[in-house]
Amino acid sequence: MGSLFRSEEMALYQLFLQSEAAYATVSELGELGLVQFEDLNPNVNAFQRKFVNEVRRCDEMERKLRFLEKEIKKAEIPMLDTGDNPEAPAPREMIDLEASFEKLEKELREVNDNAETLKKNYLDLTELKHILRKTQTFFDEVEDKYYGSSQMAETGTEDEHVTLLGDEPLRTGAQALKLGFVAGVILRERMPAFERMLWRACRGNVFLRQAEIETPLEDPVTGDYVYKTVFIIFFQGDQLKSRVKKICEGFRASLYPCPETPADRREMAIGVMTRIEDLNTVLSQTQDHRQRVLVAAAKNIKSWFIKVRKIKAIYHTLNMFNLDLTQKCLIAECWIPVADLETIHLALRRGTERSGSSLPPILNRMDVKKVPPTYNRTNKFTNGFQNLVDSYGVATYREVNPAPFTIITFPFLFAVMFGDLGHGVLMTIFAAWMVIRERVLAAKKIESEIWNIFFGGRYIILLMGLFSMYTGLIYNDTFSKSINIFGSSFYVNLSVPEIMAEKEHMLDPKNSYTGTPYPFGLDPVWMISDNKITFFNAYKMKISIIIGVIHMLFGVILGLWNHSYFKRAMNIYCEFIPQIIFLVFLFGYLCLMVFHKWVSYSAQFTGRFSEACAPSILITFINMVLMKSAETTGNECESMMFAGQEGIQKFLVIIALLCVPWMLLAKPFLLRSQNKKRVALLTNLDHNGIDHEDHEISSETHGGGHGGAEEFDFTEVMIHQGIHTIEYVLGSVSHTASYLRLWALSLAHAQLSEVLWSMVMRIGLSATDWTGGIMLWVIFTAWAALTVSILVVMEGLSAFLHTLRLHWVEFQSKFYEGAGYIFTPFSFDKLAESSEAE
């Protein structure tokens, strides 16, 4: 049986590897991705395992690569991704990689440190340049005020050596008054608080001048651009000087030396400009060197990451092995698909040849009672449907896989609720675009979670769109409008203007039906009929029940497939047969009544088979379950659809009710009988002195078998069977009713589409003058936006969730345990996918 319908057969193998060949062999198995290793050292601390030093070295290399990657992204250099998948390097190449990464990191850190130092010096010189310029303006203003313009003109060039307070200091009494000053730069946003603090701390005995630097300056540490302000503070005395400097230090202001005479300031400014030009040259050369280093690293960083992660994964896997010190070999236990055993042998041989070992690895199959992992092979088409099933629960080992059946039933049930040709076309176009351009879109690696969900389910969306187009044709519904291809089968006395105005008409099949059915789907005239809701309700409700019963019957039949494969004959006789009888005799009969009513009763007939005499199926079914005789509706009409119906219905109900104790009691009592026989047999063996292991004794239970007589608990089995019986009986009723969501959502979708057309699109079509053409563009844009956002996206999501529930609960509960665990092989491909996700 193919693995699509049932999981692959798995086996636990013991693998013996020579220590020298272990690395290369595990590397080949990682490239293959078909072996799941078991951890044989679960109680050993991660720091006490054999290859912990190698794992730490890989962690250190990853840290260095992340540092390089961060610097490359900061420099906005594109990282080359050729899509190559290099093999895992040999252990001896690990030293070369470490040396290369160490050299790159050291060089890059030195360049960064030098660049930061140069930028700091450049910032200091730039701030000093602005101080010299701004303070010169402050001094010129003071000198103009002190000397006056005429005196300055007369002194000529002598003012180059005039100090701030002139040739003669001011005198107060006998003491000379001499002012000191400090100049510096501070962040612009700190200036108001800085000024208030100076005023309060110095009690107004300082004089502050400030000027903003127009151009932003780069912070050498963070790389951000900040705005700063130049200030100069005049004061008298050493005490105020000390206090001013402390305040500047507290506000992180940078103080710079500023000469008192203009000549000295001009000379310093020339020196500062020269040093700035030299620093610009050195900074440019440093940035060029850093750029060359990062560009060279960007070409290989992707492949370096892959190599390091492969090395780390190999050593992490080797840490799961046992070490045989006597024979110098590593022992591993691994789950392997039996069908791929030959491929794995070839990989082991390649690994041995790569390592140069003379001893081939040994692979021995182990007989264990462990439950193997579940492995279903998938491709890009079936993977999405398999994920839908696995989201509910991974299939038990070798259990029937619902995924291949879900490929058909899931989009079909979705389309029953979403049936609209126009909306289906929009969904199909979107999915087809993703399918056609899947390689390009996958290469972009878009990080949006919503986009990744849509892209991962592109084939599901494609089938949902195609099936929606089919059901839309069946419903003859396209954006709430019908398509008249073959001509209507009803006589409707409406003119073309009345039809275009969507004038409703009461449709009477008795008087206006031509007798020739519409060839495909529903007659288009129903869309303009006043009683279309009544007709659609009856039609879609009955169709929903029929689809639901067929779906559940198929699930019960799949349960028979499971029982046959696992050789559980008791489950077939004690569970499957009463379950199928209960479901068919009640709800299968309900579906037969629907078909019989469709075929036997018509508006064209007269007498007992006329439309007026058609009995209500719901009332008939309720009376059947209550074993109540139906009341006659008239002289010509009969309460029963066919002769002997009442007797047949009573027989079906009685047999269905007898199935309940059959499901409840048969299996527990049979198990108890088998257990008594087993106990008696074990007792006889003990009396005769015969070893139990020489005789194979088995008993079938609800879990597949008990290991011995002492494990059997009749009360536990009875409770379990009671829960299972109640769940099935009540579930058959509630699950059948649950399929009515197909009718409800289909009707809601059609009505919402009609409301959107009548309230939005009709406004643009109702205008008769020239403005109608312009208004139609605006109205159509609004209608299209609402259609896509509400009817396609939101309604599509709602129908998707309801379809998912129908499969998880109503369908899979009939046969699916979902108690397994997924097969997770050691694979480099999955390692790459997880690293990309991070």
Image (cartoon, rainbow, N blue to C red):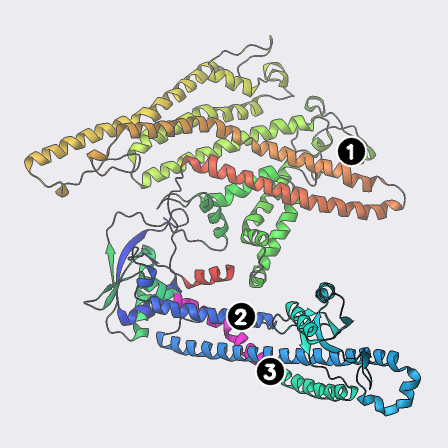
What separation in Å lies between label 2 and label 1 (alpha carbons)?
64 Å
Residue under numbered circle 2: 69
Residue lying furthest top: 635
Q: Nearer the viewer, residue 605 or 498?
A: 498
Q: Residue at x 21, y 66 (%)?
A: 325
Residue 216's place in the image compared with 653, above or below, is below
Q: Is residue 519 visible?
A: no
Residue under numbered circle 3: 286
Residue 502, numbered label: 1
Q: Residue at x 77, y 86 (%)?
A: 261
Do tag 3 and tag 2 residues touch (Cβ < 8 Å)? Answer: no
What separation in Å lies between label 3 and label 1 (alpha carbons)?
77 Å
Residue lying furthest front: 174
Instruction: Label 3, secondary structure: give it.
Output: helix
> Where in the figure is residue 152, as x and y percent of width and height?
89, 86
Magenta extent = 288-312
Discs 3/2, front = 3
Discs 3/1, front = 3
